[in-house]
Image (tube, grey):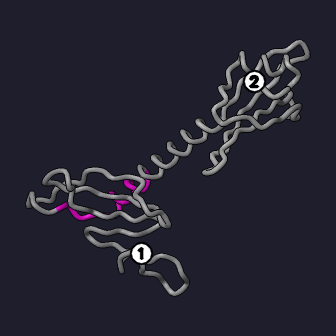
Amino acid sequence: MTDEMQMEFEDGLPAVVNEDRLWCDNGWTARVIKNEDDEGWAVAMTKDGESEPALVGPWTMGRDKKNPKPLDASAFQVLVKTASEVIRRHEHQLHAMLHKKVTVDTPSGRLNVMLDIVPDEYEPYALLSAQDPFGEVLAEIRVEPGFKLTTSSAQAWIEDEFRSPG
């Protein structure tokens, strides 16, 4: 970590920094960096506590066409909003990958069948569960994380009285 990143107030909160190429405020750090791919500049937005930037994008050249345009409050707020949105989308995508749900009509009523994948580094697994319309869990079993939840696989599980599939 650079000295700039370690600046803190006495109460332990990160310092607010408003420099031409570095802004730290409100849990975020914007750093204008040389774009390694071409002659231009980029800006990296990093959330406090994270080692990698949430967003890296092109940055505008200054009037001299050599140096980057200085950061300002307005640009920083737009960058914070954009980087926050990137993180939110990533979290939603991850949630969608790890949590699946189908609804199955049965003779006794409609059931919700869910698959919740637990991405453990050493022993990943998934929980397959069935709930009635009121949210009461009727069955829950542990299955392989690669289990494919579809309406037909859920229907087959229900018809097999919630026994372990396969």
Whether tag 2 and tag 1 are in contact, CB under 8 A, the answer is no
Q: Residues within 10 Å of mark 1 (few under 14, many from 20)?
A: some
- Vertical order, 19 against 160 (above or below): below
Q: Which residue is mark 2?
A: 166
Labelled disc at residue 129: none
Quarter residue 15 falls in: bottom left
**In the rendered view, does 102 fall on the left or right side of 42?**
right
The percent position of residue 25, horizontal first and vertical second, equals 43, 68
State the SS at label 2.
Answer: loop
Residue situated in front as seen by the camera: 164 or 140? 164
Tell whether position 79 is magenta. Answer: yes
Magenta residue span: 68-81
Residue at x 63%, y 46% (from the top left corner): 119
Labelled disc at residue 16: 1
Tell whether position 72 is magenta. Answer: yes
Q: Residue furthest right?
A: 108
The percent position of residue 58, horizontal first and vertical second, equals 25, 50
Distance from Cα at disc 2 to Cα at disc 1: 57 Å
Which image quarter holds the C terminus?
A: top right
Q: Residues within 10 Å of mark 2 (few under 14, many from 20)?
A: few
**In the rendered view, does 154 fall on the left or right side of 163?**
left
Which image quarter holds the N terminus?
A: bottom left
